[in-house]
Amino acid sequence: MKKTVVTWRLGFLSPVQDSQLAEARALLEPIADVRRADDFAVIDREFGQSDYLFTEPAAERTASELALHCLRQAHRLGRAWSIMWPGVKPLPNGGYLASDVNAALYPESLDGLSGSFNASGPMGRGALPTIETASFSVILAADEKTPPPPIKAPSAPPIEEPIPTELLRPVMSAVLDLLVRFRAFPWHWTRDAAAAQLEQAGYRCTGEGYEGPIFSAANGTTAQLPCDGAQVRAIEFTLAVQTDPHLLDETAYARRQREFEEMFRAANAAARPLLGAPAFSGAAGDPGFPDGVWADWVTLWPAADRNILVLQRQNDRELPLELCLVFVPVPGD
């Protein structure tokens, strides 16, 4: 038994109407796919005659089942037809041996089979008078022998060790300290003015980053001023950073990502008593994720002249993992 696809080619005496195609489809049930003239399967012949291809759904059949199926469908189009598969040679004086006819009607194998017949006389036009000729072809799909998948014993999920509280306490402490000092601080949103404010607050400029100057404090806290020209887009305080995460193996890298997510949650918990419930907290792609924020996780508290964010990000595998407290000016201020 193999998968077979039978395609019928019906020749009409003239270009056919939709009603004729519907009648032909009904005669050749369960054919469902009738190719239209604007598709590939119409063949225009001389004197206005047209051939249409009707393709049946694929089906699993033996050789005898296929022959019987084609014979039944042929007789829907007219009477007194027979099927003769290729390879059956006629006798020198015409005709066929009875044994060859039986083998052609009911072959033992599907290998290489295709068949056709023609009905050009009145007996072949009993059902649809406008059909001049009819033929069919058979396509045999190759056997698909897919080995069964190997049976694997279920493995227990890895046990994830809890994140140590010693890793979370410094983050919570830094969030509280920065919010107490700067949540209502009257920031200036120009590069020189904001830099002067950071220096007055104990931060020293240590260099120029990709987006603006970088500052550090004696307690190890760092800050940066992403700028568009003279305007400051944000004031970012770094709570935790993992440089060169791409040098970690996969296990260590996955654990470090989980640690930063836990530190993100700890920073949110520390900020809530001072800032209240946030307007948004979630991952990139979640509904309501703030526009214009590039991060993996964000919590947002809006204020009168600024938005306060806790964010965890890694813009690329080779770039640092970062946890930041960010002050962003409200547009228009």
Image (spheres, rainbow, N blue to C red):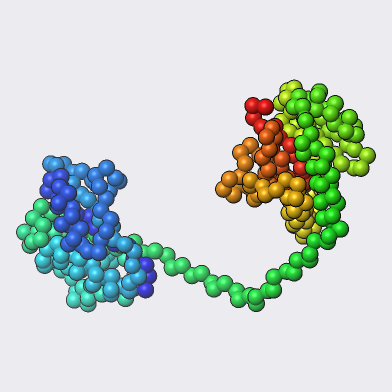
Relative to 96, is 278 above or below? above
Q: Residue furthest left?
A: 122
Image quadrant for the N terminus? bottom left
- Name the spot of residue 70 as percent of width and height, x first: 23, 67
Q: How many circles with numbers are drawn on the protein? A: 0
Relative to 316, is 207 above or below? above
Image position of 67 (left or right of 259): left
Residue 123 picture quarter: bottom left
Residue depicted at 11% across the width and 57% down the height? 128
| Along the line of sight, the residue nearer the viewer: 254 or 271 | 271
Residue 156 picture quarter: bottom right
Q: Can the viewer see residue 330 in this picture? A: yes
Q: Residue furthest right?
A: 218
| Along the line of sight, the residue nearer the viewer: 182 or 116 | 182
- Name the spot of residue 125 as percent of width and height, x first: 9, 59
Image position of 285 (left or right of 94): right
Relative to 64, is 139 above or below? above
| Along the line of sight, the residue nearer the viewer: 264 or 295 | 264
Image position of 224 (left or right of 156): right
Residue depicted at 88% across the width and 33% down the height? 201
Q: Can the viewer see residue 7 in this picture? A: no
Residue depicted at 13% across the width and 54% down the height? 131
- Name the spot of residue 195 as percent of width and height, x first: 83, 27
Image quadrant for the C terminus? top right
Residue depicted at 31% across the width and 62% down the height? 57
| Along the line of sight, the residue nearer the viewer: 166 or 228 | 166
